[in-house]
């Protein structure tokens, strides 16, 4: 939550330019927050019940489109003046209804069949919104928020300006807060971060409740859970609805910040693929690991996408080997530096994919899962034991 001041401090410090290039921008970190919430919601259902939902993007897109439709006055009973927090709630409730409808059919299957039928539902919704003329003049490009919301969307307590701040502001005005002057992007970072934090703790509370223990029992041995009397079908349906709600909230935050959405960046099945990648890198069945996994993913992508910098690597090689070495000709007009730039720049997805394969092979528990295994539990459990010893001994 303290990233913006740390980011600006490092940029204005004597830290080397090479080290500064490793820092993701504040705007990138905003994306990490809202998509990290989506990845966490994906991990909630897939990591804790063992049912891989390849159609989870449906709920993310539902939240995004709901916010934009309400802002543009195209949602029945709700006009452009609807508070943003209420729009998030409406999107979440619609996602719950969709999750129940999809789950009623999908949870009659398991394993790869469940994954495939949810993928099928995702494609049905994706094709539908691509041709849905009601949302935009060109539905393939998706809807955008109209100019009536140039002041952005307020997150906080509706009706109390002192307890609300706006995200997605077009005007570029700076905001004075607690003695500091924040840009619109920094305000969005903090406000979206608060919503993400609240949603994360809500999901954690569910996981550590009796309901959550049944979810874990389903993942470990569903037949045994049925044998001792649990109606696992209803528990799976409930978990699916909860995860759908929070996925829609994430989509609503995305639409509020970006002020637009398209079928490709909200409903397409590859959106779920990115959440799966984040969950595996961060640690399946850890919740918070999904956010760290997406942070890792986005940091690598941004670093490898720096144009003309060899994917961000050339400055390090220049300091290590010298400019003369990089300017040395290999063949024709191609230099060592030029070849490095050619191989790395614009190929971030390729290298992220390679990193993903390495994680699957050598770090199957993910970043957070492996760390927890090393320290002997979650930080809240392990830190007191490390500091004061085991009280049971």
Image (tube, helix red, strand yellow):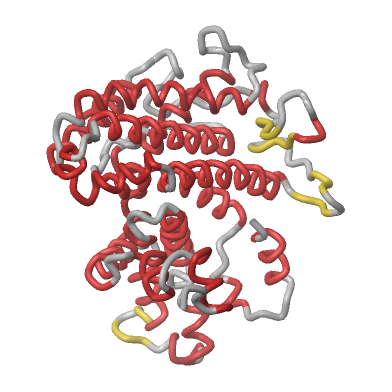
Q: Which residue is situated farthest in the top direction here?
A: 77
State which quadrant residue 344 falls in: bottom left
Residue 213, above or below 29: above
Residue 279, above or below 371: above
Q: Residue at x 66, y 25 (%)?
A: 149
State which quadrant residue 384 falls in: bottom right
194 vs 322, nearest the viewer:
194
Q: Give the quarter of the figure containing the N terminus.
A: bottom right
Q: Residue at x 33, y 37 (%)?
A: 56
Residue 245, above or below 351: above
Query: Is residue 307 visible in the rendered structure shown here?
Result: no
Query: Is residue 219 visible in the rendered structure shown here?
Result: yes
Left or right of residue 185: residue 237: left
Q: Position of residue 144 (x, y in %)?
A: 53, 27
Q: Position of residue 196 (x, y in %)?
A: 55, 44
Q: Position of residue 9 (x, y in %)?
A: 72, 69
Q: Residue at x 28, y 21 (%)?
A: 101
Q: Residue at x 33, y 42 (%)?
A: 45
Left or right of residue 57: residue 68: right
221 vs 136, nearest the viewer:
221
């Amino acid at each position: 939550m303290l990233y913006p001041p740390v980011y600006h401090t490092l940029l204005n410090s004597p830290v080397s330019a090479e080290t500064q290039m490793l820092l993701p921008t504040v705007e990138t970190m905003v994306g990490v927050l809202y998509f990290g919430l989506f990845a966490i919601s994906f991990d909630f259902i897939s990591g804790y019940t063992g049912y891989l939902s390849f159609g989870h993007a449906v709920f993310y897109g539902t939240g995004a489109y709901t916010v934009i439709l309400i802002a543009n006055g195209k949602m029945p009973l709700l006009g452009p003046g609807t508070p943003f927090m209420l729009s998030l709630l409406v999107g979440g409730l619609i996602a719950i209804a969709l999750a129940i409808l999809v789950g009623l059919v999908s949870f009659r299957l398991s394993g790869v069949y469940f994954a495939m039928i949810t993928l099928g539902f995702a494609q049905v919704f994706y094709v539908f919104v691509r041709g849905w003329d009601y949302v935009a003049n060109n539905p393939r490009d998706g809807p955008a928020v109209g100019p009536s919301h140039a002041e952005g969307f307020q997150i906080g307590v509706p009706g109390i300006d002192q307890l609300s701040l706006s995200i997605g502001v077009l005007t570029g005005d700076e905001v004075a807060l607690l003695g500091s002057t924040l840009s619109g992007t920094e305000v969005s970072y903090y406000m979206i971060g608060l919503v993400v934090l609240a949603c994360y703790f809500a999901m954690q509370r569910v996981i550590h409740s009796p309901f959550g223990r049944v979810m874990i029992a389903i993942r470990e041995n569903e037949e045994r859970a049925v044998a001792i009397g649990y109606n696992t079908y209803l528990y799976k349906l409930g978990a699916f609805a909860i995860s759908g709600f929070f996925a829609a909230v994430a989509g609503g935050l995305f639409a509020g910040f970006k002020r637009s959405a398209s079928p490709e960046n909200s409903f397409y099945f590859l959106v779920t693929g990115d959440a799966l990648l984040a969950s595996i890198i961060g640690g399946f069945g850890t919740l918070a690991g999904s956010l760290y996994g997406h942070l890792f993913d986005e940091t690598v992508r941004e670093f490898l996408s720096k144009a003309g910098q060899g994917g961000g690597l050339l400055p390090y090689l220049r300091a290590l080997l010298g400019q003369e070495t990089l300017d040395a000709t290999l063949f024709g007009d191609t230099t060592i530096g030029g070849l490095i730039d050619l191989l790395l720049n614009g190929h971030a997805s390729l290298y992220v994919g390679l990193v993903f394969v390495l994680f699957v092979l050598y770090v199957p528990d993910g970043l957070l899962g492996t760390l927890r295994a090393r320290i002997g539990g979650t930080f809240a459990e392990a830190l007191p034991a490390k500091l004061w010893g085991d009280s049971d001994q």
